[in-house]
Image (tube, rainbow, N blue to C red):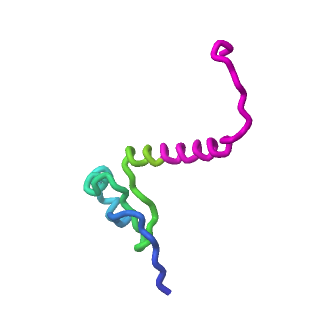
């Protein structure tokens, strides 16, 4: 039975080719976009630049904070004078 797998990248490379290559050059050739690393034609990992990875982490943090904000929205408020701070 043949199974298909979604590949969430425009560029792919095999594990074998990755071992023989310079990862920085691969990322550069992909224009900084993610590269799917395939093992037996199945996505095994994704190769990302540090910049893209850090951006993803920031987006995850933002999503977590947004959930906290939405959960607290409409809750009890306390009126405070500026002089009391």
Q: Where is residue 12, by image quadrant?
A: bottom left
Residue reaching furthest top?
83
Q: Is residue 26 magenta?
A: no
For the stretch drawn in magenta, the main secondary structure is helix
Q: Residue shown at 43%/45% (left/top)?
A: 55
Q: Residue shown at 46%/65% (left/top)?
A: 44
Q: How many marks?
A: 0
Closer to us: 31 or 12: 31
Q: Where residue 18 sits: x, y (%)?
A: 34, 60
Of the 4 image quadrants, the one containing the C terminus is top right
Closer to us: 80 or 60: 80
- In the displayed structure, 7 sits above or below 60; it is below
| Image: magenta residue range | 57-85
Q: Residue shown at 37%/49% (left/top)?
A: 49
Closer to us: 16 or 59: 59
Horizontal side, residue 37 vs residue 71: left or right: left
Horizontal side, residue 58 vs residue 15: left or right: right
Q: Is residue 64 magenta?
A: yes
- In the displayed structure, 77 sits above or below 52; it is above
Q: Where residue 73 sits: x, y (%)?
A: 66, 41
Q: Where residue 78 sits: x, y (%)?
A: 72, 28
């Amino acid at each position: 039975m043949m199974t298909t797998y979604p590949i969430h990248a425009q560029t792919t490379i095999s594990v074998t080719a990755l071992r023989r290559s310079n990862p920085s050059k691969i990322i550069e050739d992909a224009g900084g976009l993610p590269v799917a690393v395939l093992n037996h034609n199945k996505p095994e990992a994704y190769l990302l630049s540090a910049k893209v990875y850090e951006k993803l982490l920031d987006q995850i943090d933002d999503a977590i904070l947004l959930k906290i904000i939405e959960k607290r929205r409409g809750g009890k408020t306390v009126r405070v004078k500026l002089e009391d701070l």
